[in-house]
Amino acid sequence: MMCLPYLNIMAATPGTKKPPKRMVCVGTSMGFVPQNFFPTTVGCNYVMPILLKQLEQHRNNFTVFSQLDHGSHGLGGHGGVHAFLSGVLAERSKGFIEKNISVDQKAAQFVGAKTRFSSLQFTSGSDSNNRLSWSNNGVGIPPMTELRGIYKMLFSQLGATDRTLQRKENAQEVSILDLVKTDAQYLTKRVGKEDKERLDQYFTSVRGVERKLHQSANWIDTDKPNIDYSLPFNADGMDFVDRVPLYYDLISLALETDSTRVISFELSGIGKNLGGLPLTRGYHQLTHHGKVSSYLKELTLIESFHTQQFSRFLDKMSSVREADGSTLLDNTMSLLGSGMGNASSHSNKDLPLLLAGGGFKHGQHLRFKKDRARNLYTPASNLYVSMLQQFGLEVDSFNRSTGTLNGLEVVS
């Protein structure tokens, strides 16, 4: 007798539910040196530039995009990183129905209360001037910094006393919201047009808080996942190079346990001790390299660390098997990039963008046509439309988009 070898399809039993789609958006506030990030040729057989060499083992699991950006709506030097996931700066969002909502928050609206957290926002540093995530009324969502706090929120079980206290706190917060809503509704009848617009934004924020409170209340009596993972004792006191892998570990675990399906992770600085890297100058100073070789050499150490850790993250997700035999990476679209195209010149043009996993056909470098003289370009938001559609949303536009992104196909 001859037996078939074990096949992935055998892992799925009849009636197995299809795994949910997830989205992870990782952004650096300082961008990447363009010549070290973008391949010089297009298609599948491109030569890996120095930063992408860290991802060589995942060549067929990601796509690199070049000559995408947000046009004039995403310009603003260091302030332009705010538009990375939205395509629109907050101060230029008037006229947009959902203001400068970011792509992760658009996906989070779709998830709703299906998970304990509709979305999560993390950051490796305390610099809140470079927020990635923006709500549908144009408010920046503060990210969490402390690893211990993230771990506790995700995996520490609540005792009976804690659950009772949380119910009381939720009820009190709902009562306070009811009071301020009543006062605001009274004011609406007495103010002018501009103030009414501000109050409308305020009510949108209140409704968002209410939804989160109700969602939190619905999950109070549901135990959190039990995991075989613990943080190092001094996790939050570690250098940048030792802390970043821990954020990625928690991101992977949060997705694997279906605690959330949408996460943004902001790499906004390297912190004290030069991040634990063999550097002689600060990160920001190095980005203004002026093509000085010693500056570029040290900056490459930081940027290579970013791509190497993203590669480690993809390793981790590709090792997690879903119920149907697919991997966590297969079902998680993971974006790496920045709202800064070239930090040395404060340019927000030609953003460095790389998308891995998520059910797309990968293994290529896509370069899009651009005519600077006539301001003709392909919006980066076209990529976000494709991501949102793959996530399950029935949308054909997102902020400054002109459609889906040509060349990015879904696995049949």
Image (cartoon, rainbow, N blue to C red):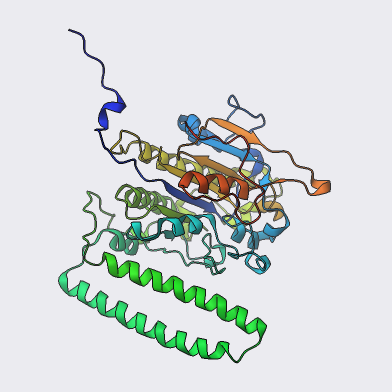
Find residue 324 and report its image quarter. top left
* Viewer-nearest residue: 199 or 61: 199
Which residue occupies the extreme right position in the image? Answer: 373
> Residue 62 vs residue 221: left or right?
right
In the rendered image, the residue lying farthest to the top is: 1
Q: Position of residue 390 (x, y in %)?
A: 49, 43
For the point 65% across and 29% down, the residue is 42
Spot occupied by residue 212 in the image (x, y as percentages of width and height): 38, 69
Q: Is residue 306 visible?
A: no
- Foreground residue among 89 and 311: 89
Q: Quadrant of residue 77?
A: bottom right
> Quick one: quadrant of the N terminus?
top left
User: Is 15 on the left-hand or right-hand side of 236?
Assistant: left
Q: How many marks?
A: 0
**Measured from the top left, where is residue 67 in percent x and y?**
68, 42
Indicate the position of residue 296 as horizontal and vertical percent values.
63, 44
The residue positioned 30% from the left and 59% from the top of the image is: 154
Q: Is residue 56 above or below residue 186?
A: above
Position of 54 with respect to 191 (left or right) is: left
Image position of 60 with respect to 401: above or below: above
Q: Quadrant of residue 50?
A: top right
Q: Which one is nearer the viewer's eye here, 204 or 165? A: 204
Q: Is residue 291 visible?
A: yes
